Image: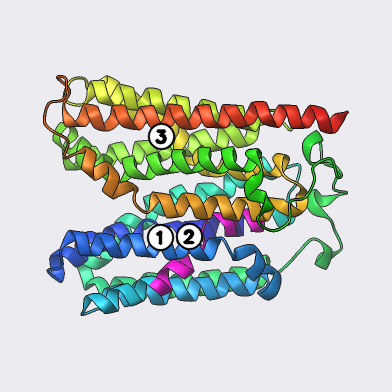
């Protein structure tokens, strides 16, 4: 669990939060247009999405530990390639390598590490491990900025990449390569007896091949996950600059830190208090609704009220972590055990391919006509975001009713 947390720190700190930092630096130091570097960031995420969909098969063929080590090497070398690229074609070539590395150190990788060891205790273990993603943003983003300022982009990429490769290589050999059976124990330290009716025995039929796409359960699961993550990434990409006019640079930075701390708290609370019998889709839908209320608060508060502004950041931040940690827990109880890893990988790939375009899409909202029915651009930005989050909650709720009907039929 703690090894997975450290992998998440580097995976997100380098593979997710690194490219936006590089976007600004490459734009200013290489005199490349923001649209060019933004396209490279999108390519990085899209390549990762393509690889993520194939990760379960890669794990079966190569093993979890070797794949994790190779991913760390790819991510480190890829980001170094970003740093030393002198021409756009070199930059896009580097994104192919970095995107592959991000895929093997991101959400599916962390879930696979945790699923190897935890069944009944998976909610708590995932909440701890996925907190590494938030820590990665808080810890490595200022480190990136500091190292780039001190020694340049190439030195920063080499330093962070070398440390990441060394640490993940050690953790992969020492912990990730170990399985319960290899040391004479079982998942959760005892017999695997699922306490959730839906994933006990063979009550849920396995869906081989592409038949998973014909399942309404999977469609609503992937759609709710995708829409929620799309909105979240779009907001996060612009939140700092939107808060700066009201709070200043330092205040906006503190506000982002406050949102991240809220994310860690929200994910931890859900992980520790989520019962085996709790309807996980209902919790996910509630998370989106809380974030939607936060967005409405931000829409009203920007330029008007600092206390309401902080309340909006708190409510939005509470859900940041749960948007990524709840979907694997939903999959655990809604799909046949043999389909869980594949369902998570496919849904994550769809979500990642979609959120690659989120910063650009929400950027268009910021260029909305200055006044639409008396609303400012910022109001439109957060109102649209809130509306999409409500839609994501409804999609999860629709799947929840379908899921309950299937469960009743299975019980009969």
**Residue 10: percent from the left, percent from the top?**
46, 61
Q: Is residue 104 above or below residue 398?
A: below
Q: Which residue occupies 27% across, 49% down?
A: 360
Residue that badge 2 annotates: 49
| Rendered image quadrant of residue 369 | top left
Assess whether residue 15 is covered by the magenta stretch. Answer: no
Q: Secondary structure at mark 2?
A: helix
**Residue tagged by mark 3?**
317
Tell which circle, 3 or 1, labels the residue nearer the N-terminal end. Answer: 1
Q: Secondary structure at mark 1?
A: helix
Q: Quadrant of residue 176?
A: bottom right
Q: Are marks 2 and 1 in contact (CB under 8 Å)?
A: yes
- At label 2, counting other C-alpha atoms closer than 10 Å, the crowd grade (few under 14, some 14-19, many 20 or more) is many
Percent position (x, y) of residue 41? 32, 61
Taking the image as drawn, is residue 71 in sight?
yes
Look at the numbered discs 3 and 2 and tell me whether their residues touch, using CB distance below 8 Å.
no
Q: CA distance from mark 2 to mark 1?
A: 6 Å
Instruction: Please tell me which residue lies in front, 346 or 242.
Output: 346
Read off the residue under disc 1.
45
Residue 77 lies left or right of residue 407; in this view the side is left
Q: Residue at x 53, y 25 (%)?
A: 286
Image quadrant in which the N terminus is located: bottom right
In the rendered image, is residue 149 in sight?
A: no
Q: Residues within 10 Å of mark 3 (few under 14, many from 20)?
A: many
Foreground residue, 275 or 342? 342
- Specify which label sits upstream in the sequence, 3 or 2: 2
Say what secondary structure mark 3 lies in: helix
User: Which quarter of the rendered picture does the C terminus lie within?
Assistant: top right
Q: Which mark is residue 11?
A: none
Depicted 277 relative to depicted 65: above or below: above
Give neighbour class at mark 1: few <14, some 14-19, many 20+ (Cα, 10 Å): many
Query: In this picture, which residue range is highlighted in magenta?
Result: 96-114
């Amino acid at each position: 669990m703690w090894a997975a947390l450290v992998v998440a720190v580097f995976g997100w700190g380098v593979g997710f939060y690194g490219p936006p930092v590089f976007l600004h630096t490459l734009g200013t130091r290489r005199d490349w247009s923001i649209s060019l570097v933004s396209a490279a960031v999108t390519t990085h995420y899209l390549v990762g999405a393509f690889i993520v969909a194939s990760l379960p098969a890669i794990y079966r063929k190569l093993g979890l530990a070797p794949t994790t080590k190779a991913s760390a090497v790819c991510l480190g070398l890829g980001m170094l390639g970003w740093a030393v690229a002198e021409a756009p074609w070199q930059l896009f070539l580097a994104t192919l390598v970095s995107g592959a590395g991000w895929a093997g150190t991101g959400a599916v990788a962390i879930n696979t590490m945790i699923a190897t060891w935890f069944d009944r205790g998976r909610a708590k273990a995932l909440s701890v491990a996925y907190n590494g993603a938030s820590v990665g943003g808080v810890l490595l983003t200022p480190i990136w900025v500091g190292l780039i300022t001190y020694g340049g982009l190439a030195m920063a990429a080499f330093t962070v990449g070398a440390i990441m490769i060394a640490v993940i290589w050690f953790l992969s050999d020492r912990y990730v390569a170990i399985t319960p059976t290899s040391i004479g124990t079982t998942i959760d330290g005892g017999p695997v007896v699922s306490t959730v009716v839906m994933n006990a025995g063979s009550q849920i039929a396995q869906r081989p091949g592409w038949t998973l796409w014909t399942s309404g359960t999977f469609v609503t699961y992937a759609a709710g996950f995708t829409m929620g993550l799309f909105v979240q990434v779009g907001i996060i990409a612009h939140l700092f600059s939107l808060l700066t006019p009201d709070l200043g640079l330092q205040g906006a930075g503190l506000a982002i830190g406050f949102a991240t701390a809220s994310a860690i708290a929200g994910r931890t609370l859900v992980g520790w208090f989520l019962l085996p019998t709790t309807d996980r889709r209902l919790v996910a839908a509630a998370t989106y609704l809380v974030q939607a209320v936060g967005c409405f608060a931000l829409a009203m508060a920007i330029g008007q009220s600092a206390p309401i502004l902080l309340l909006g950041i708190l409510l939005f931040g509470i859900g940041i972590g749960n948007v990524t940690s709840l979907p694997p827990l939903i999959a655990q109880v809604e799909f046949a055990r043999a389909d869980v890893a594949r369902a998570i990988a496919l849904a994550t790939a769809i979500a990642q391919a979609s959120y690659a375009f989120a910063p650009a899409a929400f950027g268009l909202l910021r260029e909305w006509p200055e006044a639409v029915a008396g609303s400012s651009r910022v109001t439109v930005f957060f109102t649209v975001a809130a509306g999409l989050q409500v839609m994501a909650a409804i999609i999860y709720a629709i799947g929840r009713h379908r899921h309950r009907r299937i469960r009743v039929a299975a019980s009969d």
